């Protein structure tokens, strides 16, 4: 039996909120303005989820990582200094969450949930284009997840998180030159892995 | 110019080439089919690594985040769900106002965490995403039940329904120390064919059920079960499951419902001397 899809939850956005910068929204979030927090989630959820999906190679774990990242953003809102570094702040939270989730009990538990879901969910086989698209996406996610951790983190921060090398240097604690080399090596390896992928 | 190496192409895509060198490489690639193919392959690779697919969107994510913030003891972004207008009597309105205040007020979640619930296995269950919570009135205000209730307590319930493929029906029933079955949502009915489930909203982190209930509970252990299902359940199935589970047997939930159990103790009501 096909189960109903989740209802779309409307997100109310006050006039002008979409035009505010991340820093301006974070200033409002620090003052417990909850609508601004929702705006930040809506603005960055695809980046955070995409980063986590490729880092972890597992969408169930990535959903967990995405949610935990934004929970921590709310919890640590008081620590944010609005000096134009929101992306680095959010990516650091996301990176640390992914590192934690890639080990330990939570990973096993989420994997079990994924198996349970796979046994009950039937993909909508009528939409072949969507199925092929999903498969193409998941191939990339699995291949990136096979990269060594340091290479994976560098290439994801650069192209998924759209971080500059200066931002990456602050997050990862390596020199910009070393990081650029690491990113290029990771891309060469990815090209090789994708050619081999079925 | 000679064909650029892979590193030169990567530096081009990474914005690390000078404008002059970048123009030179692009000019060469437009005339050299081999380099054009190599460049397009690398451009495609970078695009795939950074793509933000629409399938990454999840309509229940925001509600789940807010629910987790609340569970972590932080104030919850308010107004995330529609609040229902309840046509209740004056006393019930006061009780519900207290209940809403408890559920929505920042930092007011003083109940036990999800460890208070025991998930009974059902295929594909996801206990983090669905659940019930029980409250009792104390001095006119609802408080999250802390494993012990009094036999004369008035109780209220809320539910969470955030499973990625959410459930549509909920039954809440209890079995007391005397073995009696008490229907809570929906209430008891004379007609055995009466519905045994109430329709629930999907994508809600916390939705209150609009009634306060007093049950004639026997003192001793009390088992309260919330059964989430895709189809309405039959009363006899739920009652049979509650009785069988009392025997300590591993019993499948009716129609593969996801069941959450709250194990409580009922104490005698306090009597004034």
Image (cartoon, rainbow, N blue to C red):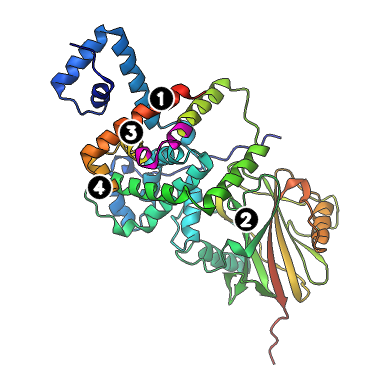
Residue occupying the far bottom of the picture: B273
User: Is disc 3 in contact with disc 4, using a CB cutoff of under 8 Å?
Assistant: no
Q: Which label number is shown at residue A176?
A: none
Q: Mark 1 = which residue?
A: A192
Q: Earlier in the sequence, mark 4 or mark 1?
A: 4
Magenta span contains residue A148? yes
Q: Earlier in the sequence, mark 3 or mark 1?
A: 3
Asked which quadrant contains residue B158, the reply is: bottom right
Q: Which residue is mark 2?
A: B131
Give the dominant element type of the magenta stretch: helix, strand or loop: helix
| SS category of the residue bearing label 3 | helix
Quadrant of the rendered image containing residue B5? top left
Q: Please report the bounds of the magenta region as a residue range.
A: A142-152
Q: Which quarter of the rendering shows the N terminus of chain B?
A: top left
Q: Position of residue A129 (x, y in %)?
A: 54, 21
Q: Nearer the viewer, mark 3 or mark 1?
A: 1
Mark 4 closeness class: few <14, some 14–19, many ≥20 residues within 10 Å: some
The chain identifier of the residue carrying mark 2 reads B
x then y, percent, for residue A171? 29, 47
Same chain? Circles 3 and 2: no
Q: Nearer the viewer, mark 3 or mark 2?
A: 3
Q: Are labels 2 and 4 assigned to the same chain? A: no
Q: Tell me the tag on residue A170.
A: 4
Q: Is residue B29 magenta?
A: no
Image spot of residue A103 (x, y percent): 48, 50
Q: Which residue is mark 3?
A: A159
């Amino acid at each position: 039996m096909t189960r109903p899809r989740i209802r779309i939850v409307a997100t109310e956005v006050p006039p002008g909120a979409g035009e505010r910068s991340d820093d301006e929204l974070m200033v409002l979030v620090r003052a417990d303005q909850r609508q601004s927090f929702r705006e930040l989630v809506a603005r960055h959820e695809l980046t955070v989820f995409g980063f986590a999906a490729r880092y972890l190679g597992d969408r169930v774990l990535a959903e967990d990582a995405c949610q935990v990242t934004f929970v921590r953003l709310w919890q640590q809102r008081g620590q944010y200094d609005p000096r134009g570094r929101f992306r680095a702040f959010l990516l650091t939270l996301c990176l640390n969450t992914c590192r934690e989730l890639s080990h330990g009990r939570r990973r096993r538990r989420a994997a079990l949930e994924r198996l349970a879901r796979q046994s009950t969910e039937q993909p909508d086989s009528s939409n072949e284009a969507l199925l092929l698209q999903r498969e193409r996406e998941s191939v990339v996610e699995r291949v990136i997840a096979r990269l060594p951790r340091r290479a994976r983190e560098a290439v994801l921060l650069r192209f998924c998180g759209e971080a500059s090398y200066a931002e990456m240097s602050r997050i990862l604690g390596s020199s910009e030159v070393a990081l650029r080399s690491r990113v290029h090596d990771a891309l060469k390896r990815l090209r090789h892995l994708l050619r081999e992928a079925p | 110019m000679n064909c650029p190496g892979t590193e030169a192409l990567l530096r081009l895509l990474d914005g690390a080439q000078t404008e002059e060198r970048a123009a030179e490489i692009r000019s060469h690639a437009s005339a050299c089919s081999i380099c054009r193919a190599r460049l397009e392959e690398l451009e495609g690779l970078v695009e795939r690594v950074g793509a933000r697919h629409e399938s990454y969107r999840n309509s229940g994510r925001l509600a789940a985040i807010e629910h987790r913030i609340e569970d972590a003891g932080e104030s919850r972004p308010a107004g995330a769900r529609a609040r229902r207008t309840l046509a209740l009597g004056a006393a019930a309105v006061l009780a519900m106002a207290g209940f809403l205040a408890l559920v929505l007020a920042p930092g007011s979640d003083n109940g036990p965490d999800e460890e208070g619930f025991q998930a009974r296995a059902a295929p594909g269950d996801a206990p983090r995403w669905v659940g019930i919570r029980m409250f009792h009135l104390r001095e006119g205000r609802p408080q999250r039940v802390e494993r012990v209730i009094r036999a004369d307590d008035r109780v209220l319930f809320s539910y969470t329904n955030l499973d990625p493929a959410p459930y549509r029906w909920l039954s809440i029933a209890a079995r007391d120390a005397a073995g009696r079955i008490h229907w809570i949502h929906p209430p008891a009915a004379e007609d055995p064919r009466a519905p045994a489930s109430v329709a629930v909203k999907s994508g809600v982190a916390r939705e209150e059920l609009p009634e306060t209930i007093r049950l004639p509970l026997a003192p001793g252990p009390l088992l309260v079960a919330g059964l989430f299902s895709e189809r309405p359940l039959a009363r006899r199935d739920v009652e049979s499951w509650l009785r069988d589970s009392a025997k300590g047997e591993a019993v499948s939930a009716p129609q593969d419902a996801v069941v959450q159990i709250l194990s409580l103790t009922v104490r005698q009501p306090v009597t004034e001397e």
